[in-house]
Amino acid sequence: MCGIFGITVSPSSGFSVEAVRQTVDALFRLSESRGKEAAGIAIHTPSAIKVYKEPVAATTMIRRAEYDRLFKSALENGTNGAGNGPAGGHALSEPVAIIGHSRLVTNGSQETLDNNQPVIAGGMVGIHNGIVCNDRELWLHNPTLRQRTQVDTEALLAMIRHHVAAGLDLVRATQMVFGMIEGSASIAVFFEDFNYLLLATNNGSLYLVENDRHDAYVFASEQYILRRLLGRSDFGRRLGNPHITRVEAGRGLLIHTGDLSRTDFAVPLSSTLAGHAEHAENAKDRKSGDLSLHPLREPTRHIEGVAAPHDARVTPALAPAAGPPIVPKAFEQAFERFQAQVRKLNRCSKCVLPETMPFIEFDAGGVCNYCRNYRPMETRGTAALDAALAPYRRSDGKPDCIVTFSGGRDSSYGVHYVKEVLKMNPITYTYDWGMVTDLARRNQARICGKLGIEHILVSADIAYKRGNIRRNVNAWLKRPDLGTIPLFMAGDKQYFWYANELRKQTGIDLVVLCENRLETTGFKTGYCGIRPKKGGKHIYSLSLAGKVGLAAYYAKQYLMNPAYLNRSILDTLSAYACYYIIPHNYLNLFDYIRWEEPVVNETLIGKYNWETATDTKSTWRIGDGTAAFYNYIYYVVAGFSENETFRSNQIREGMLTREAAMTLIVEENRPRWESIKWYCDTIGIEWENAIRRINDVRKRYMNEA
């Protein structure tokens, strides 16, 4: 999820202090795309490990005076003097190792500095990319250990130290811990009492640059980052003959911080605590006679934290945990009134669409035009899918496709199917625009860790994006209009752009979408006066006339509601271009295989311990932080939501009876108060005021409202 990187060099490598600094700065800049909420660095020398971190973007941190002083105090004291190094710089007189982190906030707010990385725990300094989903269980199973932070990385470090203290060597302790975690983890760790840099990964999101002299190593979360670094002529020249290798999923290595010798070993892929007994039972077989892998009698270096500047300020990217909100009784009563009126609406006699659906018409038998005009979905079949994949398959185990991965149920199942059934070697890709829920992130970690799949996450400036959402929601509340609700989601459409960019960066031509066409929601543009396109193949399909009409509708709304003329307008225009204009040359998995809800749910929950939401029984839209809020608006104002259109499509496909669908929509349209409050807290609006305003909007099914 985050960006981790580092460099280890010896004095013979040709790197001066200045060259090391330039390399680290470049790695910070290149890794910032993976997380912009916090950044940190640890510098390891024979005498000390110095740690500096801030709740700011990496490009901000590396301009700080404190960051500059850190390098001078940590490195220039151990040099042969100015002018003696390459290009007249300060020559290194001793080996140096540095690790860095660019954070996308998941566990623990970045406002608390201890939650940011590198994390200091148990005489160790570590960085971590991924999510340990069962960190609470790990702490509960080890009650003698004291938890100091909210971040899951601390659990990894504490468990490694715990097993070393119990007599395991460093390799076996690392293997033990990786066998216990559920989720994904790529780690880099320094020790006060081991002369090693530990690297390990269970999903392969770790790449390494080394040279033939073995006097320098550089690692990062993505191959593209290292390729960009090697593109700098000065960097490549210093290394001599550099080459990039992937630390495969289920592998680890120890790099000696003195002579840079390397030890490779295996680690388990994601597991659960069920494996704990097996690991503990075999612990006696995991001890090693290699004394260098056991702690030194006395720590040879101290760990020193460098204070962040007092003027460091942060706009939280992680909202406080919402928890079950205290819902005003008036809200519950109002919803009951709305629901009672919605039940009176005329509905299609075949599906469950109500009379408030845009452009709906009923025939003499009460069947709607959407049912009459519906074309049953045809899948091309597995033989056609195999033929489509054949040109891209690789036999060398290297990645051969990119699967877009929101963390929702369809993309989660798609990743499973591509890897386990089709036997492809995917990389997964997520564009995090600030509304990917923590639940979705945990499910991404579960699947990538279990399957050993690299996960590339492109992070927007999340605080900025959430600010844009706030501006558009506040503008909407001033003059509510059902047609402009999609403005709340404008910030996520760049995911198509970055999918195309990632194709170029990785050299992987095949991008796989897991788009369930049962989820088409033409009513959203219908409220803009755009008639649905019959048989539209994709959710983003719209005729040229429809695109022009949509643009005209939004232009009119902007003129009628100047509150929309805010800084988000450029983001909105970009979203329109990404959604409707740029090429979408992707393979959609569900064009070839039939989507079956029971199969999807049973596979994810049974095989991957896939997590569900606490405020709904449905597994749909629980990874999308916006859905609970906008579906509440649609239901309260129009008398239906996405649930009706989705369940109606299932009826038409013979997947569901109308009676079952009617029962489901009653349950699924209940307000998800916890998620609604999370959304409002996250974008910075007062949730009760927002609900009151929505409840006051004139209803399309109540004359008195």
Image (cartoon, rainbow, N blue to C red):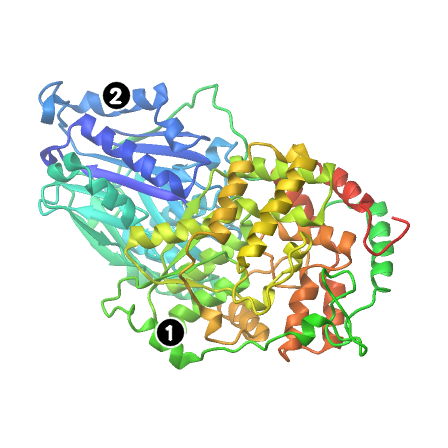
Residue at the front extreme of this rendering: 545
Residue mark closest to the camera, 2 vs 1: 1
| In the image, residue 413 above or below residue 694 | below
| In the image, residue 617 above or below residue 243 | below
Residue nearest the observer in this picture, 404 or 539: 539
On screen, residue 587 versus residue 250, left or right, reads right
Residue nearest the observer in this picture, 549 or 412: 549
Residue nearest the observer in this picture, 153 or 513: 513
Q: Residue at x 46, y 36 (%)?
A: 37
- Neighbor class of circle 1 (other Cα within 10 Å; few <14, some 14-19, many 20+) is few
* Residue under pointer 1: 422
Residue 315 location, x and y as percent? 54, 31
Name the residue type under label 2: Lys
* Residue 146 appearing in the image: no
Residue 38 location, x and y as percent? 44, 34
Instruction: Give residue 72's mark.
Output: 2
> Does the CB distance between marks 2 and 1 fall below 8 Å?
no
Residue 231 location, x and y as percent? 20, 41
The mark nearer the N terminus, 2 or 1, is: 2
The quadrant in which residue 382 appears is bottom left
- Neighbor class of circle 2 (other Cα within 10 Å; few <14, some 14-19, many 20+) is some
| In the image, residue 332 above or below residue 654 | above
| In the image, residue 283 above or below residue 200 | below
- For marks 2 and 1, give the CA distance: 52 Å
